[in-house]
Amino acid sequence: MKSYLPNDIKDENRKIIFDILLQNPELAKVEITEKTAISFVTVSKIVNFFDQIGILKATGESREGSGGLGRKRTVYRFVENSYVTIGIQMIGKRITALLVNLHSKIIDSYSMETEIPFYSEEFIPVFDEIVERMKKKAAETNSVVLGIGIGVDGAINTRKKTIRMKTKEYKEQDFFYEGIIESLKSKVQLPIILENDVNASTVAEFRNLENTESSVTDLVHITLGDGIGSGIIINKKLHRGFNASAGELEYLCFDEDYKRDPSSVGWLESKIGSEYLLQSFDLHSESGMKACIHYISKKLALTITSIISILDIDQIIIGGKTISLFPDAVLESTKKYVEQYTDWLPNISVSHSDHSTALGAAILMLQQEILKVISGSGHDDKNS
């Protein structure tokens, strides 16, 4: 059985109170005590500490005690812009950067296009320019930038420390990412995390679901565009797997005779990626569109059936630029085929989120760095 040190308990109490404040933007110390099993003395110390580092601010208002009895309670307001993170998504030639606050709200956004790939040294000044722009906006809102989350359309292997990305020749190549990230860190002097684009967007989709459905705990988010991929959340945590390759659907195969070339994409991506679809279907004709929709839906339904038969996850979101061409038709057709292939029907919906990869990357960085802030380590407070 694990034993807990006093500092572990202190950090856990701070995390509990921080989570309560995320849901309740204005509270008094007694009200926080009433929502937890934490003593008033401990709550008072934590609230004072949060006030000191800028997460909370006394509003100048007060409330009567229970039933109008007792002394008045000072009310504290959660300062959602006190700390922010930068989320950057790099998909194809398009780069989108977001400045995101503690409530996962977007304060600012910026987009650009570049031919320079992420793994090139020439990308460093481009990255620096984007970050400096976001830092200036953060200064306007008196926000402390905690770090940068980057979502890239590549397969990340944390064991080998590689990221597998497409080259201009539509081939795939592995690049060692640790040196890339260290170069970017040294330039901008901020913590950086690198995440697969679909994993990052899954985090954003899950946060959106949490805001509308408090009971959701699991999610599979499948995206279809130049390739196919998915992100998996189990018990409210992103599931990455042994190599951080969980959800790399491009390698899913329904052809027993298929043999993959080391530099080519996987079977499913070769059959459902945008390049194959454009070559195989006339999307300018109604018959061609219908044929493409049914073709996509069958492959998606087989994929969904394979996932839910193993993980028993009920919440499925599909998205990506291919799905966005005919979202309602693909959704309806996919549901029909899933029901045909299995005896239960999960809750399948279409994503309508913009820049979800950048938002999810920012949320992931926030989840990592805010723990350092509220534990009193790793970041200078706003008053220092």
Image (cartoon, helix red, strand yellow):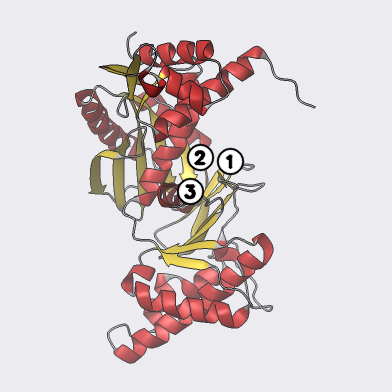
Task: Identify the disc placed on residue 161.
Answer: 1
Position of 110 compared to 195: left or right? Answer: left
List x then y, in percent, for residue 225.
40, 65
The quarter of the image holding the N terminus is: top right
Up the image or down, 76 lies above or below 220; here it is: above
Q: Nearer the viewer, residue 52 or 153?
A: 52
Q: Is residue 222 visible?
A: yes
Question: Can residue 224 be seen?
Answer: no
Dot placed on the residue nearer the N-terminal end, 2 or 1: 1
Real-space Cα distance between discs 3 and 1?
36 Å
Gap in angstroms between the C-alphas marked 2 and 1 = 6 Å
Q: CA distance from mark 2 to mark 3?
A: 36 Å
Q: Are marks 2 and 1 in contact (CB under 8 Å)?
A: yes
- Quarter of the rendering containing residue 126: top left
- Can you give x and y, in whole percent of width and height, for residue 377 in the image? 50, 15
Categorize mark 2 by other alpha carbons within 10 Å: few (<14), some (14-19), many (20+): some
Residue marked by disc 3: 214
Q: What secondary structure is found at the residue carrying circle 3? A: loop
Element class at badge 1: loop
Amino acid type indicated by mark 2: Tyr
- Residue 177, numbered circle: 2
Q: Nearer the viewer, mark 3 or mark 1?
A: 3
Check the image and report above or below for 56 versus 170: above
- The kind of residue on which mark 3 rests is Ser
Q: Amino acid at mark 1?
A: Lys
Residue closest to the eye, 188 or 298 = 298
Pick the quarter of the image with the C terminus: top left
The mark that comes first in sequence, 2 or 3, is 2
Q: Secondary structure at mark 2?
A: loop
